[in-house]
Image (tube, rainbow, N blue to C red):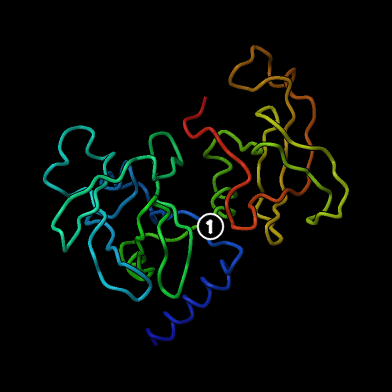
Amino acid sequence: MKVIITIFFLFTIQLSFGQTFQNGLILPDKNEDDEICCIYSPKDGFKIYDGPNGKLIGTLTRNVTQNTGDQSPYKIYFVDNQANTEQLVELGNFQEIGYEVWALTYKQIKDDFVNLNIKNKNFWLKISDIQKDRFYLSNWQTFLSNNVDNLLGFYANEPGLNLREQPNLNSRIIRTLKGDINQISPTKEHNGHWTKVKVIISKEHPCGTDLTEKENIIEEVEGWIKIVDDEGKPNVWYYSRGC
């Protein structure tokens, strides 16, 4: 029965992500535990492989002898089993998803493995290992929809996003969203790369205005945007630290 469940899970992951959602984040099931702050990682770190169904080559962990002091939660090291070395993975390789909270991102799923989005490193994690550590994969589309209330709005990447009546390129354009005065709130209604969104058009960004909310809002509209690109990367950005 356990084997059947595992096969079903992997099939579901591939079906959900496919070629469309090969990019996303690795997040904890729960984030109340201080041990996973401030870069989300299991207590004992992630096991690293050299490829899908490959050899175990090391661990991505903060538990190394040189990682001391009050900045230790912000540092993750690759411990190489063969070379017996500890190499710091720069913070820029992680995605800030909240105020001083970072997560690993991935760029490919193959079989029961996921490839980390770390420059010049071919690091693979085993999905079943991730699950055992009470973490999970979240594609960007799902992450954006699930964090509407946790982040200070989403805004279109340059050169802008077309808000359309229906989730296809032939549908009428309602308006083009640009800059941070077009605050996008994704719903959980999706169609492929597209997500239905609510948009507040403001005179000034809420963080830098003396206007009341009523005075500042020009219009509120709904429509569809292609919230992720063909590789499953976000077409929107956000202020991870708030105002």
Q: Position of residue 55 (x, y in %)?
A: 27, 72
Between 78 and 145, the one nearer to me in the picture:
78
**Quadrant housing residue 101:** top left
Q: Tell me if 186 is positioned left or right of 54 in this view.
A: right
Q: Quadrant of residue 173?
A: top right
Return the residue nearer the eye: 5 or 126.
126
Q: Position of residue 115 (x, y in %)?
A: 41, 62
Residue 183 lies left or right of residue 15; in this view the side is right
Q: Is residue 156 above or below residue 26?
A: above
The reply, left or right, for residue 71 in relation to residue 100 is left
Circle 1: residue type? Asn
Residue 195 higher or lower than 100, as above or below = below
Seen in the picture, residue 160 relative to 226 is either above or below; the reply is: above
Point out the image quarter for the N terminus.
Answer: bottom left
Between 110 and 187, the residue placed more toward the observer is: 110
| Residue labelled with disc 1 | 139
